[in-house]
Each structure stands twice: as C-alpha cells, then as structure tokens.
Amino acid sequence: EGSPLDGKYWHLAEEENKIRDALKSANATATPCGELMKLTPRVCNTPMRGGTEWTPRYRGDESSIRQLLKPSPSGYIPSKVGDAEQVYGGREARIPQLRIPIGEVDVAMIARSLPQRNRSRKRSLSTSGISAGAASAEAKRGGHHWYSRISSTSSMLRNETNHRILGRRLVDDSESIVPGEGWEVQGGNIGYCDGTLNSVCARDKSSICLMTGHNDGRGTLDGDALSGWVVFNLKDVTQGLFLARMESWFPMESNKRTEGWTAINGKRTRHRHLKAPPPPKPADYRVEVAVNGVITKSLNETEFNDLCVEPGYNLIICTLWDDEERAVKNEKEDVELAFRMAGGGRKAIMGITHVYYA
C-alpha cells in the first residue's frame, strides 16, 4: 500500500479502535476524564488537535504552538530566547549495536523502499508547515531526510512564514486585534526533536555533550500585558473548543522581550516558582479572549481562574473557548482566536505550553 504503512497493520490497532469507539459513545461527564475536566467534559470524547512547545513532539516544529500563530504585521513570530544555530546537522553515527547484521532482514529498509502513499494524517497535530510530499521531494534532492537539514528551530520557522498564508486582519479600526510583538519562547530545545533516532536536537553551543540526543525540553510561550495579542490560526474548526495548558507562576517582569517597554508593543530603549506560591496579580489585571475579531471574554483574575481546572500537580488547563452551538452545526470553519493580558504591565505574565482545539 505504500509508505508509511496504514495504521491497521499496527499490532495494537484493533485494541486501540475498540477503546476509541467506546470512548466516543460514552457519557463524557460520567468518565474519570469528565470528572477531571468538569468545566468542559465534552473534550473527553472529542478528537482534538493542537500544538506544544515541549519536546519531543511529532514531526518536530510542525506540531509546535508557533506553527499555529499568525505573524505580526512586521512578520514577527515568537522565537526561542537565545536561539542559536546548531553546531552541526545531519544524523549521528549509528550505534554499532543497532546495526543489522549481514545476512539479516532489514525491515525498516523494506518499509522505506515502498512508494510514498498520499493520505491525510487525521491524527496529526500539524495544521500547517511542510507537507509529506514536499518532505519526500526534499529527501530525494538531499539524499537524506529533510529534517536533518534543519539547522535550528528559528530558521525553519522563518522559512515557513515566508510561504504560508498569514490570515486576514480581524478588524480594521483603532482597536484592531492584530498579533503583538512581545511574546517569546523561553526554555526548550532547538532542532528537530521528535524523540526518535532520527532526531537532530539540542546541538547548540551550550550543550555539554552534543551526542547525547536528549530530546526532553519544556519550552513556554510567554507574554505579559505589554506583549499584545497572540493570535492562533485554527483550521477546519467544527466543535468550538480551545483549551490551553497555562503557567501563571513565572516571576513578574521576567519576559525579556518587553524589557524597557512602557506601552503595548513598545520599543525596547524565568525561572519557575515551584516552592513558593506566585505573587498576586496586579489589581488591574485582566485576561481577554477574542474569536474572529470579537472580544468574547474580559476577565479579572478570579473570573479567569474559574475557567481552569487542575487535574494534576503543576497541571492547569484553561478553557478559553467553548461554543456548543458551533458543535451542533458541526461545520468546518477557519477561526482566528486571540488571547492577551490587559492591565498590569510587565507584572501580568503568563506562559502557554500546550494548546488543544477542535
């Protein structure tokens, strides 16, 4: 049938399908998931897509939060603080113990030799970026996998931005909801970090051992009340859902991008609180959410916290959009969802590590 092989050939495919079918027909509220996600239990049996700044992740940066973001008018997309080129590219030398002995069958080679099969990846987190066909063509030109040519996270995203549709302006007046310039990514790895032997990850100059291949990284998209809007381009939305894993415990004024700013998107002239609770938010702190140019929520700290659940330690998930009427219609639509802090200046900081939508 071609490469990659259809999921039905996986030895656990039948069991997986049984579990998925049972979950789809279950009463979401009555499930353990529904008890944890009590504010939005329907997410428990709704297929979701999303993105994350944590690694490893599927297909590298194609499933990052940044691939969902609409660039600012200047073309800016948040990048990793201190982002640098990798020291070298390409695959590592193969571990001798993993080499196929002479005369033995190389199953992986057989699979790779199959013709490419054109199909959509229904379970992929990716909503934009390099297509499977483009990746295949690049691999043929370069003689090896396309991702081994990536020198850094930022260079890939800059190239992607030049070719993808930037989206439409939400509104066209003095209150335009357009992407801000003050968001950035703190922490995490650079490179293609998919958790496999093919990864080209964390080979920056600060590494103490370039060949470890260690993919674990916890990046965070950070912004404060001077950062402006962060706008997500969400394709083929049907269920009216958008949730995010958020971190509000960063020290005040720790967003390096807005250092020296005195106004939103102003001109320039982290560390986590695990043991001590985060300081209280400024009195004028607010969180605002807009959908397709219309502000749907403007919340103080208490009201915003009411949208969040904490199903585990250090795990806070907030429902920023829940439109059940859209779910009833079940019609695909491209949506622009925007989020910002308003009030509190650089003291009103928030981090986003994962987003989920349907």
Image (spheres, grey):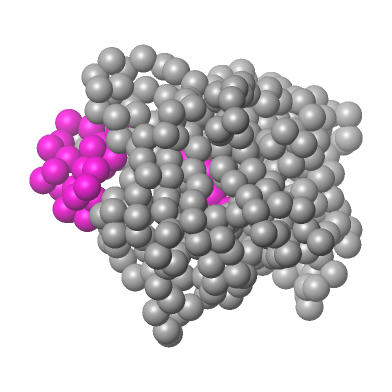
Q: Is residue 214 visible?
A: yes
Which residue of the protein is positioned furthest toward the bottom in this rendering?
275
Q: Residue at x 37, y 44 (%)?
A: 298
Tally of numbered discs = 0
Is 299 placed left or right of 123 in the picture? left
Q: Is residue 111 visible?
A: no
Q: From the top left corner, tell me how far across and down residue 346 is, in percent.
A: 58, 64
Q: From the top left corner, tell me how far across and down residue 304 is, in percent.
A: 33, 53
Camera-side residue of 157 and 69? 69
Q: In the rendered image of this protein, does residue 115 appear above or below residue 94?
A: above
On whether residue 342 falls in the magenta region, the answer is no
Q: Quadrant of the C terminus?
A: top left
Q: In the rendered image of this protein, does residue 349 appear above or below residue 66?
A: below
Q: Quadrant of the N terminus?
A: top right
Image quadrant where residue 208 sits: bottom right
Is 74 placed left or right of 7 in the picture? right
Q: From the top left corner, tell me how far across and down residue 285 is, in percent.
A: 43, 59
Camera-side residue of 335 and 140? 335
Q: Residue at x 81, y 61 (%)?
A: 269
Q: Residue at x 55, y 55 (%)?
A: 225
Image quadrant where residue 209 sits: bottom right
On whether residue 32 falls in the magenta region, the answer is yes
Magenta region, residue range: 24-53
Camera-side residue of 242 and 96? 242
Q: Residue at x 14, y 43 (%)?
A: 29
Is 228 placed left or right of 206 in the picture? left
Q: In the rendered image of this protein, does residue 159 appear above or below residue 209?
A: above
Q: From the top left corner, tell me how far across and down residue 343 is, in percent.
A: 49, 56
Camera-side residue of 194 and 83? 83
Is 312 placed left or right of 199 in the picture? left
